[in-house]
Amino acid sequence: MAFLPGTALLASKVPRKILFMFTLSLSVTYLFYSLMSCYDSLRFPVLENYAYQAPEVTTLATLREKLYSTPSRAHLEHELVATTVTANLLTEKYEVEEITAAGWERARVETAVSKSAALNLEHPETSTMDGGLGRAANCTSDYGEKKLPQAIIIGVKKGGTRALLEALRVHPDVRAVGNEPHFFDRNYEKGLDWYRDLMPSTLEGQITMEKTPSYFVTNSAPKRIHTMAKDIKLIIVVRNPVTRAISDYTQTLSKRPEIPTFEVLAFKNRTLGIIDASWSALRIGIYALHLENWLQYFPLSQMHFVSGERLITDPAGEMTKVQDFLGLKRIVTDKHFYFNKTKGFPCLKKPEDSSTPRCLGKSKGRTHPKIEPDVIRRLHKFYKPFNNMFYQMTGQNFQWEMEDGGDSPGPRD
Ligand SMILES: Nc1ncnc2c1ncn2[C@@H]1O[C@H](COP(=O)(O)OS(=O)(=O)O)[C@@H](OP(=O)(O)O)[C@H]1O
């Protein structure tokens, strides 16, 4: 029997037309995959505002790797870091969003300097309490037009975002929606017209704002916000991640008293000291990793970081920096704040013609449960490298590492 090589045998048996079609389809598939891989490698650098040069990419990458990888037993004992970040359904379900109305009422600045402020005073707001999403609470006037926000407080949850927004609303050139719209995380499919319609009307020179602290930890939020407005200003109120986690837990506990203790939820393995970094109360505080996502889309110059601690100890000082960042006149000053001993926090001064209290409501400034000191120490150790990375990335040292390993300054804890 004559020996024929495989291809020749194939060619002899299969009609030429079919062979041609087969070769053609192979070529098209190859071309398609080549184009796809080119597209992938081209995608990221083309962002217009990409200005971020990670200071120590390897270090951040190493930190991320440590957090996400499955370490060996020896590694576990040395690093004591949680091994997975898959959603922890058990603990995630305890996440309850804070949607209670804020108690800080809007203080009208008597010495309004802008034309817009003068108009606002002619049409004082009927209600100062935060209302439903449809009609914003700080609706001082129906004059003007609804605009998409030019500045957003994007985080962090339990950082002091409500205190900041309410203090900003004192400014006559700031108009903000009272409740959290959650547009870029939960309601994006409703579209920009829906979002714009939530906003209060503004006059020329006034800034439209909103706050939704969960944006900071939402992967899709930076891109979506960038698509809406490349030049938007972003404000992030940050707080010692350990205190923040306890605050977050305290809020959940107030609504779900049956949940396990903080100490139980914080660890994957308490004996080995393995932190559960997938628990959202802890994950939110890894600021460096979340910030890295934002820096893919926005330069640092478009971001302003507020110290949640200083917002309590020196609210006027923090407000000066925020007003400068937003290009606003420095109208909100120390004259607007007083320290309320009963509340244990700064509150806004009442205007002369009103007797309404101007402290934030009961859901702000809750008493935290006492957490075991060695758990606090362990969490400080866990966050330390991420905090240092965050200080490098922002160029600011928030001084969360206290010498005694204790909590940051604040009224409690
Ligand atoms: N002036 C004033 N009054 C009351 N509370 C103040 C104030 N300034 C900052 N804080 C701190 O704000 C913490 C709540 O943060 P947020 O408003 O960002 O919380 S939320 O994410 O909107 O639920 C809240 O956290 P807890 O103390 O844990 O309740 C406060 O510590």
Image (cartoon, rainbow, N blue to C red):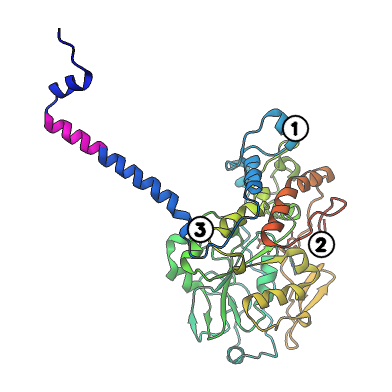
Name the residue tied to disc 2: 410
Which of the two labelled residues, at mark 2 and mark 1, occupies the earlier sequence position? 1
Name the residue tied to disc 3: 186
In this picture, is 349 found above or below 76? below
Q: Quadrant of the N terminus?
A: top left
Name the residue tied to disc 1: 77
In this picture, is 113 found above or below 106? below
Q: Is residue 43 magenta?
A: no
Where does the image place residue 64, in percent across and percent down from the top left? 63, 45
Residue in the image at 43% along x and 53% along y: 42
Give residue 122's quadrant in the image: bottom right
Residue in the image at 47% along x and 72% along y: 196
Residue type for callout 2: Gly
For the residue carrying disc 1, how many other residues have a C-alpha within 10 Å: few (<14), some (14-19), or many (20+)? few
What is the chief secondary structure element of the magenta stretch?
A: helix
Where does the image place residue 2, in percent across and percent down from the top left? 15, 10
User: Position of 84 compared to 370: left or right?
Assistant: left
Tell me the SS state at disc 1. Answer: helix
Which of the two labelled residues, at mark 2 and mark 3, occupies the earlier sequence position? 3
From which residue to which does the magenta span run? 16-26
Tell me the SS state at disc 2. Answer: loop
Residue type for callout 3: Arg
For the residue carrying disc 3, how many other residues have a C-alpha within 10 Å: few (<14), some (14-19), or many (20+)? few
